[in-house]
């Protein structure tokens, strides 16, 4: 079933839309969630919660041209929420590691102005990503979107650990320079 047909089922409030979504994207969504939560049970919950959030979001949204990206974003946010809840009283080394790697490029903000800036930042990073080679883009996304460890990236692409670390280091520096050029950071 095509994404457009599935979206039409959501718009008609046909509950089979959830099953079609699961059949088509369930494995991929669970993989995203498990990569972040590192727990099969939590990943399954995030996948199921993704279907509920999708049911609530369509309509008004009609993500016909980017349905998997729409689902993946929901799954990612739910998975991060699970990690935050699980570790709210203690800092989780994995999540703080990602933050440390990117904090030299991107400052954080927790207010409304920060949310607006976050959307602008997302657009800028998207433009930067499109200008990168496929290899750099894939490694960067696996690390900072899917939150794969360096070791997982090495296994996935067959690169040496030093190459992956080098690509990530150069990518962060390139992003920092691009953000500076775009006037996002001083």
Image (cartoon, rainbow, N blue to C red):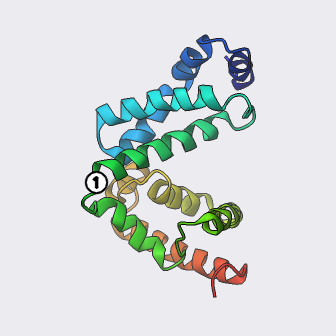
Name which residue lies at 30% across and 56% down: 88
* Secondary element at tag 1: loop
Of residues 158 and 121, the one drawn nearer to the viewer in this rendering:
121
- Residue most toward the bottom? 186
Residue wearing tag 1: 87
- Residue most toward the left? 90
Residue 110: % across, % down: 53, 66
- Residue most toward the front? 111
Residue 113: % across, % down: 65, 68
Image quarter of the C terminus? bottom right
- In the rendered view, would you say 76 is above or below 175? above
Of residues 49 and 68, the one drawn nearer to the viewer in this rendering:
49
Q: Categorize mark 1 by other alpha carbons within 10 Å: few (<14), some (14-19), many (20+).
A: few
Of residues 168 and 13, the one drawn nearer to the viewer in this rendering:
13
Name which residue lies at 66% across and 83% down: 180
- In the rendered view, would you say 2 is above or below 169? above
169 left or right of 160? Answer: right
Image quarter of the N terminus? top right
Q: Is residue 177 visible?
A: yes
Residue 138: % across, % down: 54, 55
82 left or right of 18? Answer: left
Residue 141: % across, % down: 52, 56
- In the rendered view, would you say 34 is above or below 27? below
Quarter-wise, where is residue 160 in the image? bottom left
Name which residue lies at 31% across and 60% down: 94
Q: How many marks?
A: 1
Quarter-wise, where is residue 137 in the image? bottom right
Q: Is residue 27 visible?
A: no
Name which residue lies at 47% across and 54% down: 142
């Amino acid at each position: 079933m095509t994404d457009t047909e599935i979206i039409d089922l959501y718009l008609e409030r046909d509950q089979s839309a959830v099953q079609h979504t699961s059949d088509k994207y369930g494995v991929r969504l669970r993989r995203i969630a498990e990569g972040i939560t590192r727990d099969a049970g939590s990943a399954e919950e995030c996948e199921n919660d993704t279907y509920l959030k999708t049911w609530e979001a369509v309509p008004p949204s009609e993500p016909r041209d980017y349905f998997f990206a729409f689902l993946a974003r929901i799954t990612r946010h739910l998975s991060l929420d699970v990690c935050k809840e699980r570790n709210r009283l203690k800092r989780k080394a994995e999540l703080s590691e990602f933050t440390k790697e990117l904090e030299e490029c991107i400052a954080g903000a927790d207010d409304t102005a920060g949310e607006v800036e976050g959307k602008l930042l997302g657009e800028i990073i998207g433009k930067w990503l499109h200008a990168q080679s496929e290899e750099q883009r894939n490694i960067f996304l696996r690390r900072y979107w899917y939150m794969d460890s360096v070791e997982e990236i090495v296994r996935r692409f067959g690169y040496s650990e030093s190459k992956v670390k080098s690509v990530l280091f150069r990518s962060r520096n390139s992003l920092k320079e691009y953000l500076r050029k775009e006037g996002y950071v001083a």
